[in-house]
Amino acid sequence: MKSLLNQTKVMAILGILSGIVLVEACGRRLNPQPSCNFVENQELQRVSWTTDLPVNLYLDSSVPPDYVKPISEAIATWNALGEKINNRDFFILNDGDPGSPTPAQDGYSKIYVMHSWEHSLANEQARTTIYWEGNRIYEADMRIDAANFQFFTDALDRNFAQVDLQSLVLHELGHMLGLAHTTATDSVMQPSLAGGQIRETLGQTDIKDIQCQY
Ligand SMILES: [Zn+2]
């Protein structure tokens, strides 16, 4: 964990329906790499957790009990890929609720359900913030927008006026791993998720991009 930041850079890539906020601290210069649809630092290197896996995730107390299953299913989908390509999970969902009760750079990677949201960003279903130094992510926080959206937590309860929570969380977990948005039609990292749309499985694009880095 870095305690002193020479410079903090905040960038926003806002998709139609979900966002990612990037907080970059200055690090040593590194050689450029192909992006493979990852967020890149100023030296055009992919940012990722490198070998520091699994990501330790916590659920804030704002996450209702019925959200735990779809969140766990989305985690399991990414972990199945991690186990297949590298015999290693990407995420571990821990018990307890340490750290800040509101999203903050506090040393804990947490998922929050928000009941207030910036009015100017009311079309965002969720937002993931990743913090990195050099090319290494060291924290990521996910906000789910319950101020502007309603969610269904089981495909059997599909509702076209609501958002599939599992599909949304699968996308945001991709941001947590360092992925950016893509227009590839098989990808869970497409910037928008329609009401009632179910996109709960990774596409070949996602698998290829992840294998580029992990
Ligand atoms: Zn997104």
Image (cartoon, rainbow, N blue to C red):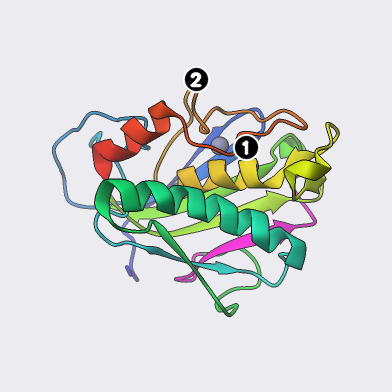
Answer yes or no: do the residues labelled 1 and 2 have beta carbons within 8 Å? no
Q: Residues within 10 Å of mark 2 (few under 14, many from 20)?
A: few
x, y percent for residue 83: 33, 53
Q: Secondary structure at mark 1?
A: strand
| Residue at (74% x, 34% y) in the render | 123
- Report if the beta carbon of the residue with label 1 is closer than 8 angstroms to ligand 1: yes
Q: Nearer the viewer, residue 211 or 124?
A: 211
Give the residue furthest to the left.
31
- Residue shown at 57%/28% (left/top)? 191
Residue 18 - label: 1
Residue 11 appears at what percent x and percent y?
A: 47, 40
Ligand 1 under 8 Å from disc 2 Cβ: no
| Alpha-carbon span between mark 1 and mark 2 | 14 Å
Residue 88 in the image: x percent, y percent? 31, 58
65 is higher (above) or lower (below) than 84? below
Residue 173: x %, y % from top left: 50, 48
Q: Earlier in the sequence, mark 1 or mark 2?
A: 1
Disc 2 on helix, strand or loop? loop
Read off the residue under disc 2: 183
Q: Residues within 10 Å of mark 1 (few under 14, many from 20)?
A: many
Range drawn in magenta: 105-118
Q: Answer whether residue 42 is visible to the viewer in this image.
A: no
Q: Is residue 214 magenta?
A: no
Q: Amino acid at mark 1?
A: Ser
Kind of residue at disc 2: Thr
